[in-house]
Amino acid sequence: MFRQFFSISVFSVLLRQMTPVLLSALGCMFCYRAGTFNMGMEGYMLFSAFASISVNALTQSWVLGLLAGMAISILFALLHAFFVHKYKAHTIIVGFAINTLASALTIFLLQALYGSSGSYIPDTVDPIPTLTLPFLKSVPVLDGLLNGHSVVFWLAILLTIAAHITFKKTPYGMHIIAVGENCQAARSVGINDAAILYSTFVICGALSGIAGAFFSTGATKIFVRDMIAGLGFISIAVMNLGNGKPIGILFASLLYGASKTLSLQVQTLPNMTVPSQFIEMIPYVLTVIMLIVYALVEMRRKKAAS
Amino acid sequence: MKKTVSMRSKIWAVLKKVFNDDLLSVLFAVVFSLIIGCGLIFIISDEPWRAIESLFVLPFKTSYQVSNIFSKATPLILLGVSASVTFQSGYFNMGAQGQFYVGAFAGTMAAIYVTGLPVWLHIAIVYLAAVAGGMLYALIAGVLRAYLNTNEVVVTLMLNYIATNLIAGLLSGWLRDPSGSTAVRTQYLDESLLLSDISAAIPINKGILIALAVAAAVYFFMFKSKSGYRQRLVGKNMLFARYGGININRTILISFGLAGAIAGLSGAVEILGVHGTYFNDFASAIGGDGLIMSLLAGFNPLLVVISGLFFGYLKTGAQIMQQNTAITRDFAALIQTIIIMLISSRMLAAYFNKRRLNKEVKELV
Amino acid sequence: MSENVIEMQNVYKIYPNGTVANKGINFSVRAGEIHALVGENGAGKSTLMKMLFGLERPTGGSIKVNGREVRFKSPKDAMAAGLGMVHQEFMLVPSFTVVENVALGNELVKGIICDRKTERKKMQKIAEEFGLEIDLNSRIYQLPIGVKQRVEILKTLYNGAKTIILDEPTAVLTPQETEELFQSLRMLVAKGYTIILITHKIQEVVSVSDRVTVLRDGAVIRTMDTRDTTQEEISTLMVGRKLSPPIARKQFSDMETVFAVKGLNVSNRRKAGAVKDVSFSIRAGEVFGIAGVDGNGQTELIAALTGFAPVNSGEVYFQGRKITNMTIADLRDLSIGYIPEDRNTMGASLDSSIGENLVLNVLKRKSFSWGPLIDQKAFSAYSDKLIRNFEIKTDSRKLPMRSMSGGNVQKAVVARELSEDPKLIIACQPTRGVDIASIEYIHNKIIEQRNAGAAVLLVSTELTEILALSDRIGMMYNGELVAVVNNDEALTENEIGLYILGLKRQERSDDLA
């Protein structure tokens, strides 16, 4: 049983579980640092999952599928930003609207386009490839650890590093933080805060788009109604736990990935009498615990500082 | 710098009054999105006129369908009122779905496992259990918000998933209907506990009366009582409320507790009035629907009755449309979301306002 | 005759909601001069300069810089044209270092990475050349206000400004620091820079400017050479009439002590904000003014006295009763009126109606309710009475608070707090950002209450206000009450300045009461 929990294959499951959360949380972070709370990732990812598998099945190209997913996702993110900025709508309500729309629209299209009420499993999907370095194949431990993971995972790692550098060292990153912390100050030196807002939403849309495509054409080759199952919201908690910084988010999503992997592994144990739904509950419970821990830490920090 | 008082500006003055009104921009948005919806019907359906007829006309055709309108409106009104309670105090309770299910489940458990009581007492216990269940479940998020300042949006959303999974797990195993059917539900409840129609002459389920009563009671509470004044003030400016000596934590607990209680009550009404049993995930989008009702009504409990009835009507029509054509019920959900997008943006009111003001400004310079 | 660096012709600014901020402004600035732009709060000075700096767009009229017509779309354009602005509220990002703030918006890059080294070198040079003492590596939230202002000035110079606009720069400075600022301004002008100084303090206008333009109700009244005019003339032009002094303070003797603070210690995140061993007392019919530069503990002191922050040690007494660390709700039940520093965030709920704002304190009154329900008629009558008695300009109590001007909002706050004739009034910055008519009104109301026997604790950064209203004055510096003196003829603003700058301390006597 020990081996079941700690084998190399479990490790790759962990990375696979961590990838979409990491991407989504990074996206959420950009909007958050710029001063706007974005909870529309659930909807962006769902739209992207649907779009990318559809385009993928049609063209048999994972690249086109991925790009289609990102495009749709960015479109809705821009719509979100537009309503918030131009018409002063509340970001939570618009996010809620997009999430609801995504669910309703994808279910509707599932029926209208593919005649299915539950899932869409095309034969002609070209899955997002995994990365295998040939020279590593002969190295015993590294082969298992580093080979065979999805391209998206490595992309996510690169993006995490890129995000880190952006906020620490680039003018763009400085501008985002300035708009988030003191928008008036940013405006007074000529920073276009609307452009910053829109750009962070575009980034969030792009990252969520990648995550969504990963859901339907990377980890699996299927679209199921409401398949994101709350991951968009979980990524908000992950972002909080990671303190709104890229490296912190990396660790927080690792933590989430571990909990999800654990629950999956427990389900496959022999003699499992606990209903599977209880096990599926674990990531959500863990998210609530994460939020409580984060709140306690924040309280202690504020007390210590005074 | 003279202000030209022309015919044009007089017309603009009238239009300004009309379109400044939030209520009218809501109306506009509803009509607009219905037009979009009808457009969609024409695009995707082979028999569009039959679909339109099913959607808009047939709900009034038989008394069965009319009673359906009220049945469908009941949980929408109750959950809309629940959402209004928290929105008015400035919090985002996205957990009505979970609170609804927990309340419904608690009520069902009380209905099945509490025995040996006179019927009227048993019914009271069932409702009490449902209200308590919903209230306590909501207070989890409320307490976390009050004392730890956690973000209630994510917590309540997570609690939804937790509730759904927990109940599903219980239903598929230990608490399943012992009569051996394959459906994932509890046994059927005793007939004596169920909510019947108002009378033989009015074949509409009593649930709607409960919904109307709750809406009126909450309106009274929010706008005519001291406690309600405090709840609303916290929603408008928390610091000012605190400065006035209002206990913020208490307002949070009242807000979440009351909202959860109403959601739980709605769950019980659905079980006792419509289904007669608790089967898994029997109202999967009802929480979100309640939020939309509340948004449409500007968070006013009395106006929620109107938006709830309207959507009860739409949902009934969508169901008929599904029976008669190939278009599914999810269509109504689509309409709903188009509406919120428009409402939440107050796009229309803002647009008209801007045009009017630009005109006036140009005249002044 | 030097050329006009700035020329604004027939400039208008009308906001979408109909407010006319500026009308038909003709304003020009000559190269190498210090030009003062004066007017009372709400006269339109800030708006005019915001248009010049590209933060707002004019609704009509033209603006010329160095003879060329310009249409600034954003501050970036203004900066490129050689303009710089030091705003009334500091435009700084608290968590950034000085370097990061000064470079914000104009960062130097190597590839896509910020080149902080080169930036720092440039800033060091400029700071030295203009005598600005700043630690470039410190973070903004650590800096005191005077230094923050220097950072703002450094920012304008770093961005190549030749004409610098300063918006009410002395609001946060002591008299001594103000003189230092003016020295810097004179040095800049000597080096060929042009200065536009926005202020409502006439004394400053006279002491440092070459020319002065007076604004009133959004329009230019007159532009004149400073040496050709007097303080009185400027003041009359600003207000449109002669200012009347506040009503006389009645003389009292042997009144009882209403409010006493003994050895109060309050702690805070940052060292500079703590309150250290503060003691004072106030009698009935007395105004005790606390003077001091913002950030020396006044905010924390008031927070502790009003239940918003805990007291570490020490005691507070009201009418002989200990009220240390009482909850806000309990304090509200006592006969204490509290006019908070910030009317927009704490003093009022801008989105609620005026009526709803005015009844905040009388909710618990039995005569206004039927059990848990509100007696709407009683509430309405009460609100209307307050609106009448305090001359609040509004059409209806049902309108949102937001619809009123700053002065009227403040009057509503004052009305609410003073209408029940409280025994103690705590007033913080009661006339900040308020038009002169309302300032006079509020000052008179405070004196009225004082003359009727109320004890008043007045906290203000405006020395003129402190001197006009107080019977005794306490000065705060670095969290301590460094002196308590009687407000008699001999006391000058300069002397107060020495105390609140920490340059002078009073000998500690046991009886500071």
Image (tube, rainbow, N blue to C red):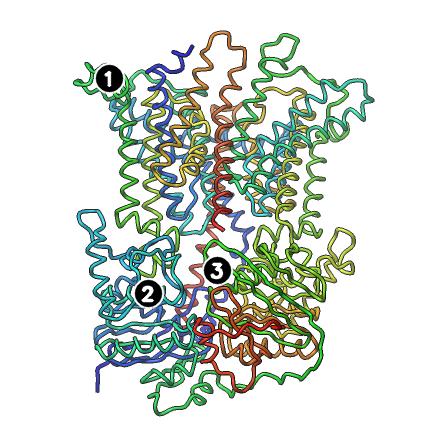
The one nearer the camera, C475 or A243, is C475
Q: Which mark is residue C398?
A: none
Q: Chain of mark 2?
A: C
| Location of residue C41 with respect to C400 vertically, above or below | below
Q: Position of residue C463 (x, y in %)?
A: 49, 77
Asked if residue A10 shows in the view, the reply is yes
Asked if residue A47 shows in the view, the reply is no
Q: Position of residue A145 (x, y in %)?
A: 28, 19
The amino acid beneath tag 3 is: Gly
Q: Which residue is mark 3?
A: C273
Q: Secondary structure at mark 1?
A: helix
> Residue B215 lies in what quarter of the image?
top right
Q: Which residue is mark 1?
A: A143
At label 3, counting other C-alpha atoms closer than 10 Å, the crowd grade (few under 14, some 14-19, many 20 or more) is many
Residue A56 left/right relative to C109 = right
**How far apart, in angstroms, are the residues tagged by discs 1 and 3?**
58 Å
Q: Which mark is residue C152?
A: 2
Q: Residue at x 49, y 21 (%)?
A: A280
The one nearer the camera, C45 or B29, is C45
Q: Position of residue B333 (x, y in %)?
A: 50, 33
Q: Residue at x 19, y 20 (%)?
A: A133
Q: Chain of mark 1?
A: A
Residue C313 left/right relative to A299 = right
**How far apart, in angstroms, are the residues tagged by discs 3 and 2?**
22 Å
| Location of residue C449 with respect to C328 vertically, above or below | below
Circles 2 and 1, Cβ within 8 Å, touching? The answer is no
Earlier sequence position, callout 3 versus callout 2: 2
Q: Residue furthest right?
A: B118
The one nearer the camera, C507 or B123, is C507
